[in-house]
Image: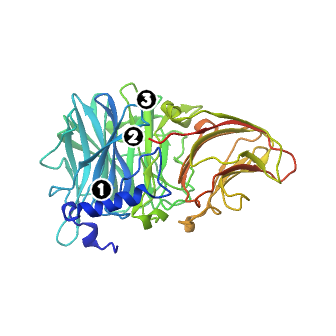
Amino acid sequence: MEWTRETRYRAYADWSAETLLKLQAQAANSQYQLGYHIRPSSGLLNDPNGFSYFNGQWHVFYQSFPFGAAHGLKSWMHLVSDDLVHWKDLGLALAPDTKFDSHGAYSGSALPVDDKLFLMYTGNHRDQDWIRHPFQLGAWMDQAGQITKLDEPLITQPAHTTDHFRDPQVFKHRDLYYVVLGAQDKETKTGKISLFSFKDLKEFTDLGYLEFTEAEMGYMIECPNLIFVDDKPLLVFCPQGLDKDVVAYDNIYPNMYLLGEDVQLNKAKFEAGDNQIQNLDDGFDVYASQAFNTPDGKAYLISWVGLPDVSYPTDEENWASCLSQVKELSLKDGKLIQRPVVSMADLREKGISLQTAEKVNAKQQIIAESGEQYELKLTLDTDQNGTLHLAGNDDLSQSLKLEFSTGKDAYLTVSRADIGAQFATEFGTTRTILLPDQKALDLEIFIDHSLCEIFVNGGEHVITLRFFAEAGNKQIALTSPTEAALNYRGTFWKLKSI
């Protein structure tokens, strides 16, 4: 299908039920479809929205265009969970059905208030001249899941920003309500984070731009989140067009974080001390992450595994993208740690213990055939060099490669250059992180058909990527440049579908 403007913004009612059913069947039958992650039943999934805990359940919404792998007329889909792992799809939650969100119900957040869940999101409206008018809108969801939109916008475009003004995160801090929004300054055309306070979710006060760095943050900031991890403020955001001399990154657009020492919201100041802006994920495909604090202060994060303006092989099957597994955030020695939630272990089938074995035909085999969804925990001893192959064919000419050195100048490089359908190669086919010298390397790897999530050294780094291997490529193997066997130990589990 040719995705013209008219097609992208066709009203949902003008699409036939037969078309939608065919798209759903096509996505369900894809060899790349996921088994235990949130994914679209049809069409495009992008930003996670409204991640929250309300009425005894976890809630997450996501941006949806259900009619193809294209960015068109967006709505919110709604899922709930009892454990942050098993999700129930409740279907369409916010439709683009008012004059303020006529061209899309865009990204936003959620906050429990008394016995209701308050939703705040950007309504995208285009006038007859196709000029965009962003409106920050509100809605209430009751305990039965019924959503009622507010009649009028909460915040309209300030005079000092362009029409790139979106993605509100609403939160409460010290008994006051605040909202951070992604923005582009009208005068400088640079990325900013706008900050508002508001009383009773009605009377808003513009506090200006949040001061958090002296560096220029590209031409736009999307999806800002301000949360607290072990009582320290954490800013998560997506600066588009960021100069790579400010922070090195390889993806078309990065997802960054900044750990703070203090935040004075009444003065719009985020004090980072000596902390530097860093990549949230060291892989290829994470963007638009959303985080929130639970009532007991814990911090959780979920991400869109996909990137704007990047085409994926499943586009040809009329579906695209997924959400990451949920991660719990903590601090260790002043570093951000991201870990799988405890309930991920409930997906495990009987584990298989792994340990150093003899080399076979110049390769060291761990598991002959892995299946397409599994968890692999592996510890590689120090002073070793080699490659861990995932989703490999019999001779390992095709595989997802994890090249490592655990000696001096230690590193881990992930390469998807030799596995299946290639895409986004203009942004490189490898990602490398530096590791502590003379230390063992701990890997916790989750594979879900076409998605790989790697937790390195207990969550000090996370590497997330999509890959599209040929059917039947299921080998896991270790190879090394020497005749000596590599020393390792670990556990392998097949994982259940949800």
Q: Are marks 2 and 3 in contact (CB under 8 Å)?
A: no
Q: Of marks 1 and 2, which one's residue comes earlier in the chain?
A: 1
Q: Of marks 3 and 1, which one's residue comes earlier in the chain?
A: 1
Q: Nearer the viewer, residue 484 or 456?
A: 484
Residue 490: x and y in percent read 69, 36
Residue at image location 30% in from the left, 53% down from the top: 166
Secondary structure at numbered mark 3? loop
Residue type, mark 1 in image: Phe
Residue 80: x and y in percent read 33, 37
Q: Which residue is mark 3?
A: 298
Q: How many marks?
A: 3
Q: Which residue is mark 2?
A: 226
Secondary structure at numbered mark 1? strand
Residue type, mark 2 in image: Leu
Residue 314, labelled with which disc?
none
Q: Are marks 1 and 2 in contact (CB under 8 Å)?
A: no
Secondary structure at numbered mark 2? strand
Colour mode of the rendering: rainbow
Q: Is residue 78 above or below residue 5?
A: above
Residue 165, labelled with which disc?
1
Q: Nearer the viewer, residue 360 or 428?
A: 360
Residue type, mark 3 in image: Lys
